[in-house]
Structures are given as structure tokens and as C-alpha cells.
Image (spheres, rainbow, N blue to C red):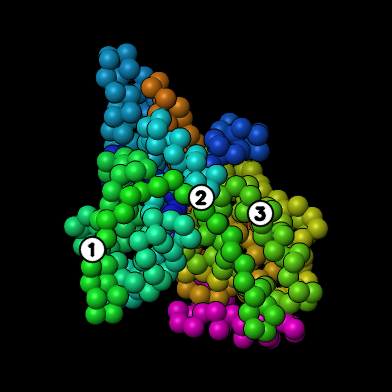
Amino acid sequence: MSGRDLFCQPRRFGRGAALTFVFASVLVAGAATGSLPGGIRPSGSGETRGAAPAGHSEDVTRAAEEAAADGKSPLEAAERAVSRSGDRWAAVYSQGEYEEFEDSLDGRYTGVGLVARRERDGRIEVTGVRSGSPAATAGIRVGDRLRSIDGHRVDGSPVTDVVSLLRGDATDAPAGTSVTLGLERGTRAWSQTLRRARLSTDSVTVRRLADGATVIRIAAFTKGVGDDVRTAVRRAPAGAGIVLDLRGNSGGLVAEATDTASAFLDGGLVATYDVEGTQRALHAEPGGDTARPLVALVDGGTMSAAELLTGALQDRGRAVVVGSRTFGKGSVQMPSRLPDGSVAELTVGHYRTPSGRTVDGTGITPDLDATDGVLERAETVLSGLGDPS
């Protein structure tokens, strides 16, 4: 299964425990603008059985407040309460972690500038190196194999764990701290020590295929992605097909995913979501390009906001979905500010596609299953949907 881009901001469950990825931040982009009520945010989630019981938010907040009154750590008390709750996708951030999380949604992150994926044999292969990054300066190339990070073997590891090691999440490593990579290129094996840096992401990349079709790859739904996709669609050759590559996209801002849907839909429903039993809806803006052929590429690393977008395009009959089954994450969480400035995010509901499907634990099944030669399969589909020239 393909991995996730290494610059994606991971989210913690407790201190240095298993990582999940962001689906949306309404505390940052929704609650601040009133686009979703009460600080609610649709966020990455697992299966419905992972949802928190009623009163869960109050229990966590009460534990934090009691700890603060006793001179103890509200953050640690919240983590203990979350761990007991059964809310498997809840997250607790320190104030500094949450600030960094907000930065990531603006397209900024701390790292070395690598993009990678896990191959079928478990190898971690570099698939991208950001220009001007520490990795680029060190001469790391696409196709290099990443064998270890600070002495930890990464073959067979989930890319989420690789992200954590590269970023130094266990120690809250800031920019300027060093990380030693074990690398391999052909028969050459070597170690390279890099210093982490503050970097910005290009969440949208665009390229033209030989037949005139345009590939729009969205790595994550950071701020401005919707506008970037609209611009790419407008600049695509008239009548040419578009491949929307969502493979490895771990999520991001729900507003940007909805705005991206608006580039291909003429208004209408994108998703519904429930918040403690109350149904709400997300709608596309009218005026999107509904004529040109569209194929969406997905895989097991397509998560959360990317699944919401995929589900909308598939249910509305706007795109043919090609690839492999998506990850299956989609719940609604509410961020709560704790007495010491830390933040707890707690599951309160789930979202559904326009036809009423939930992706929790099941993901989205593509219209055409493909694990090899996916882009070539997409080109074939486009040729059948319309003349890409």
C-alpha cells in the first residue's frame, strides 16, 4: 500500500503514541469564520465503534479542570481520560503542538523535505525531494531507499511511524535539530545527518500528459488548495481530461475539500455530517466545470477529507474512481481548550457521502480496481470518456 507524503502533519494520541492524520480543522478555519457551529470539526476517524460515549467531552474537560485545581497537569489528565474513553481517534495537543498543527494547515511544517511511500515489499522509497530542503542539499534523490532513521530500522514500518521519526515527534524536536538517515542507492549504502528546517509545502502540483490531459495532484488540503485547483482547471486545455490524484492524501481542511469539489460540480451536496444527532450538510458552490472528463485516483493512503471529496465526485457521477480501496476514516470531532492552553479533540459524530454512505472502517471502493499502472489505466478511462485532445 502506498504511504503518505512525509510532510503531512501527524496527530498524536497521547504522548508519542500511535499517529493518525488530520481530516479538517474548524478550530483554525471553521469555528473562526462560523462555517461550522460550535467549534465542531469533521476530522479523521476510524470505525463507528471507536466513537466516544455520551458525556465524553464533559468527562475529559472535568478531569483537566480538576487536575488544574490540584496543581497537576491538565494535559496529562486529559490524556488519561481519553485513553479510558474508548475514543480511539481522539487527540490531545500541548499548546505548542497545536500551534505547529495550525502551521501545518497553512502549509508550513518542520522536516527535511522528503516525500516517500512504502512499497509492496515493505521498503521505504523516496518519491520526492523538495527543492532547497535539507534533503535536497544533502543530495538525496528520488528512488533512494530509506533504511533507518536515528538508528531505527524503517523497512516494513507504516509511513506514519516514519513521519514521526523524521519530525522528531517523540521529543518535540524543533527546526535545527539533527536527524541521521540510513540510505541506499543501488549497491551504495551510507548515512547522512541532516538538520530539520521550517519548510512550506506545495500541496497542489500540476503536470500535462502527452495526450493533453492534465494531472492535478493534491498532497493535502491545506489553505488555498481549492483556489489552486480551480486555477489549474481553468488553465487546462479546452475539452481535455483531468486526472485528480488523491493517492496518499491524508486529509486537511474540510473547507478546502469542499471548495475543490466546487471546481467540478455545479453546486449541490458534497457531504452530510452529524453532530451529537443533529444533521448538517456541506454544499459545493455553483459554477464548476461539469463537462470535461474526470478521473480520481485513490489508494489505501487516501483518507478523511480526500475520501469526502472522492465520495462526492463518485456519488454525483462526476468522476470515475480508479485505484484501490481508500483508508476509511471520517468522524466529527470537537476541539476543547483545556485550562493550560492545551487542546483535546473528541469524537462526536460521523460524515456521509451524498448517497448516505459512511466510509468509517470500510473506505470507498473504486469504480475500477488497479494497483499497478494506475495512471495508465486513468488515461485509458479518459480516452473512453471523451476526446482528451
Q: Residue at x 49, y 41 (%)?
A: 103
Q: Residue at x 59, y 64 (%)?
A: 205
Residue 66 vs 356, above or below: the answer is above
Precedes in sequence: disc 3 or disc 1: 1
Q: Which of the two marks, 3 or 1, is nearer to us in this view? A: 1
Q: Which disc, if any, is residue 147?
A: none
Say how many tags the image has.
3
* Highlighted magenta segment, given as a residue range: 365-389
Left/right placement of residue 118 relative to residue 130 reads left
Number of residues whose C-alpha sits closer than 10 Å to that of mark 1, classed few (under 14), some (14–19) or many (20 or more)? some
Looking at numbered disc 1 in the image, what kind of residue is underneath it? Ser
Q: Which of the two marks, 2 or 3, is nearer to us in this view? A: 2
Q: Which disc, if any, is residue 226?
A: 3
Q: Which residue is mark 2?
A: 200
Looking at numbered disc 3 in the image, what kind of residue is underneath it? Gly
Left/right placement of residue 247 relative to residue 136 reads right
Q: Residue at x 38, y 74 (%)?
A: 143
Q: Residue at x 24, y 80 (%)?
A: 187
Indicate the position of residue 281 as horizontal and vertical percent values: 66, 47
Residue 105 vs 155, above or below: the answer is above
Indicate the position of residue 180 as horizontal and vertical percent values: 25, 56
Indicate the position of residue 55 as horizontal and vertical percent values: 42, 30
Q: Nearer the viewer, residue 332 or 24?
A: 24
Precedes in sequence: disc 2 or disc 3: 2
Residue, far left? 151
* Quarter the N terminus occupies: bottom left
Q: Which of the two marks, 2 or 1, is nearer to us in this view? A: 1
**Res. 280 in view:** yes
Number of residues whose C-alpha sits closer than 10 Å to that of mark 2, classed few (under 14), some (14–19) or many (20 or more)? some
